[in-house]
Image (cartoon, rainbow, N blue to C red):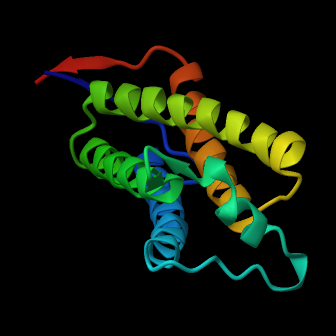
């Protein structure tokens, strides 16, 4: 197994930053999942939009709320971030990066649907998307900073 030396970001191991962002995303996705699986719609307050997005045909894939997939993705990303933080195994960072990239691509599509097809924006969905983009950017920064020093374990 290959371990890599990790350069801190703001004095912290980037795995900690990723884990915190993963918990934020997981919390949002859990809220949306519980509400939607319970037959309700998320509360957006005065901003509105969440109701229309939740009631749209695009809020489910094969009958499963999109937020449930967000829970699964966030749990997987959180597991990878913690494992990377604990072990510094470079492959775990790469897996986090790849999965968050896939999530960002889906998020771009979902934002397109909200704006141009549904005609409403869900602030919860957008917040989840922003957390996902932040996760991707952190992993990208670590990856771009240069080739890590690989140490054989």
In screen coordinates, is 60 left or right of 69? right
- Which quadrant holds the N terminus? top left
In the depicted structure, whether residue 19 falls above or below residue 81 = below
Confirm whether residue 16 shows in the render: no
Horizontal and vertical percent position of residue 24: 53, 66
Residue located 64% across and 77% down the image: 42
Picture coordinates of residue 53, whole percent (x, y): 72, 60
Percent position of residue 29, x then y? 50, 64
60 lies left or right of 133: left
Q: Residue at x 45, y 26 (%)?
A: 98
User: 113 or 76, which lies in front?
Assistant: 113
Q: Residue at x 65, y 40 (%)?
A: 107
Quadrant assignment for the C terminus: top left
- Residue 14, x across and y down, in percent: 47, 46
Image quadrant where residue 44 sits: bottom right
Q: Nearer the viewer, residue 40 or 95?
A: 40
Q: Nearer the viewer, residue 103 or 139?
A: 103
Which one is nearer the viewer's eye here, 89 or 32?
32
Can residue 31 be seen here? yes
Q: Is residue 76 above or below residue 102?
A: below
Q: Is residue 59 left or right of residue 143?
A: right
Left or right: 124, with 16 as reference point: right
Instruction: Give the residue drawn at x 23%, y 49%.
Output: 86
The mark tally for this picture is 0
């Amino acid at each position: 197994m290959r371990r890599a030396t990790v350069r801190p970001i703001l004095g912290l191991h980037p795995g900690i930053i990723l884990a915190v962002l993963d918990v934020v995303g997981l919390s949002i996705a859990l809220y949306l999942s519980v509400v939607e699986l319970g037959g309700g719609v998320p509360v957006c307050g005065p901003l509105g939009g969440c109701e229309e997005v939740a009631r749209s045909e695009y809020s489910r894939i094969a009958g499963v709320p999109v937020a449930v997939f967000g829970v699964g993705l966030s749990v997987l990303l959180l597991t990878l971030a913690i494992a990377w933080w604990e072990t510094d195994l470079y492959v775990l960072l790469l897996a986090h990066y790849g999965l968050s990239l896939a999530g960002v691509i889906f998020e771009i599509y979902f934002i397109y649907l909200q704006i141009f097809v549904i005609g409403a924006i869900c602030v919860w969905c957008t917040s989840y998307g922003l957390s996902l983009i932040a996760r991707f950017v952190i992993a990208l920064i670590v990856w771009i900073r240069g080739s890590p020093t690989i140490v054989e374990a």
